[in-house]
Amino acid sequence: NSAMQITILGKSPSWADVGGACSGYLIESSETKILVDCGSGVFGKLRERIDYAKVDAIVISHFHGDHCLDLMPYAYALAYSPRWSQDNPPPRPRLIVPAGGSELLCEIAGVLGPGDAIVDAFEVSEYEPQDAVAVGDFELHFCHVPHFIPTFAISVTAGGEAGRFTFGADCAPNQALIDFAQGSDILLIESTLRVPEDDGPRGHLTATEAGAHGRAANVGRLVLTHIPDELDQAVSVAEASEAFGGDVTLASEGAVFHC
């Protein structure tokens, strides 16, 4: 059975909700486990649910801290946990990052600790937007979306009758995501703002814009993420639902979806 199960580990924006974590989403089939983004606080949330040594791959949408900083504690666990020995060496999960990411990982790690901590702990590979990357039961596709740094939406499909899950990452309003997510069973889309940014380049969506993107992409289910708990989330859901033309779900930590 290759059906996908998606678990929300963290859905906060660049600062964590009370008791929460930033961007991190666990996607599982019966045979394969991948982690989409690994932001601040996500590693501990992952450990509450599965053994971190069982993750086959981590895929990163972009290198803002709320999407990648917990790669450091993850790397330290793989390097230094007392569970490892000569007879039981640690695994090296795949770490799939945007082009140029290997160098950035060394820069990030070098600020926080040993510069080679992440690249040594994981099997790092880089993707280009046109790539299709196979990880066990899953196939990953990518789409560049407008944000403040190079950022990529990610879609995950599995064989057989399983559906298609698309993560919109962080983005300003854009047609590329609508085209990329077209017909997805689930679109997990950011809804950071109440009103659009008005001071320079945009990098995030309002709830109304998120709903409009979901409607234009003809998705089966729209789930809002990357939204602070200090915003009235019921208003965001109502605004997104009106624009979507149907029910919209707010991502919550521990929520599970199937596709």
Image: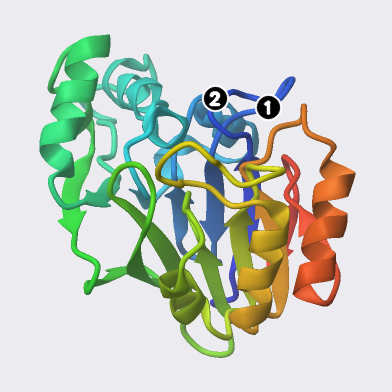
Residue type marked 2: Gly
Q: Which residue is mark 1?
A: 20
What residue sits 58% from the left and 79% below the top? 184
Q: CA distance from mark 1 to mark 2?
A: 7 Å
Residues at discs 1 and 2 in contact (Cβ within 8 Å)? yes
Q: Quadrant of residue 198?
A: top right
Label 1 or label 2, whichever comes before in sequence order: 1
What residue sits 30% from the left and 71% below the top? 134
Q: Position of residue 112 (x, y in %)?
A: 27, 11
Q: Nearer the viewer, residue 203 or 222?
A: 203
Q: Position of residue 164 (x, y in %)?
A: 54, 77
Q: Which residue is mark 2?
A: 41
Crowding near pointer 1: few (<14 within 10 Å), some, many (20+)? some
Number of numbered markers? 2
**Label 2's element?**
loop
Crowding near pointer 2: few (<14 within 10 Å), some, many (20+)? many
**Label 1's element?**
loop
- Residue 253's place in the image compared with 7, above or below, is above
Q: Position of residue 137 (x, y in %)?
A: 42, 73
Q: Nearer the viewer, residue 92 or 110?
A: 110
> In this view of the protein, can residue 83 be seen by the observer?
yes
Q: Is residue 110 left or right of residue 26?
A: left
Residue type marked 1: Gly
What residue sits 26% from the left and 21% below the top? 79
Quarter in which the N terminus is drawn = bottom right
Q: Nearer the viewer, residue 27 or 102?
A: 102
> In this view of the protein, can residue 1 be seen by the observer?
no
Residue placed farthest to the bottom in the image? 160
